[in-house]
Image (cartoon, rainbow, N blue to C red):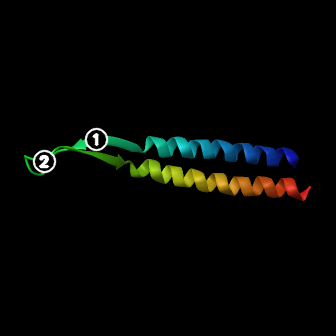
Amino acid sequence: MKSRATVELVLAAVAAVGCVVSWLAARSTGIAAPVVASEPSMPTVAYDPSLIVLAVALATIAGVLAVLGVTRLRRR
């Protein structure tokens, strides 16, 4: 059972890395046009909702796998 716990912990780490990559990829910057002609352009930040959902799902999976892996290691 120790090998299964190790596999779960490795998969948890991979899911955590995927979560971070997805979260960082979700952000994109742009320039918003001014509302009034005399106003300057404003920098804006837009987030891709599908990548944020993926990041949250991967964080959940990483947490569950980490708990299961640590539990299996502690039972022995």
Circle 2 residue:
39
Q: As drawn, is 31 to the left or to the right of 13?
A: left
In the image, which disc is placed on residue 53?
A: none
- The picture places residue 72, in percent across and down from the top left corner, at 83, 55
Q: CA distance from mark 1 to mark 2?
A: 17 Å
Q: Residues within 10 Å of mark 1 (few under 14, many from 20)?
A: few
Q: Residues within 10 Å of mark 2 (few under 14, many from 20)?
A: few
| Point 65% across, 51% down: residue | 62
Q: Give the mark, 1 or 2, whose residue is nearer the N terminus.
A: 1
Label 2 secondary element:
loop
- The picture places residue 73, in percent across and down from the top left corner, at 85, 53
Label 1 secondary element:
strand
Q: As drawn, is 56 to the left or to the right of 42?
A: right
Kind of residue indicated by mark 1: Gly
Q: Quadrant of residue 6?
A: top right
- The picture places residue 65, in percent across and down from the top left corner, at 70, 53
Circle 1 residue:
30
| Point 12% across, 51% down: residue | 35
Q: As drawn, is 38 to the left or to the right of 24?
A: left
| Point 46% across, 51% down: residue | 52
* Quadrant where the C terminus is found in the figure: bottom right
- The picture places residue 19, in percent across and down from the top left corner, at 56, 46
Q: As drawn, is 26 to the left or to the right of 3?
A: left
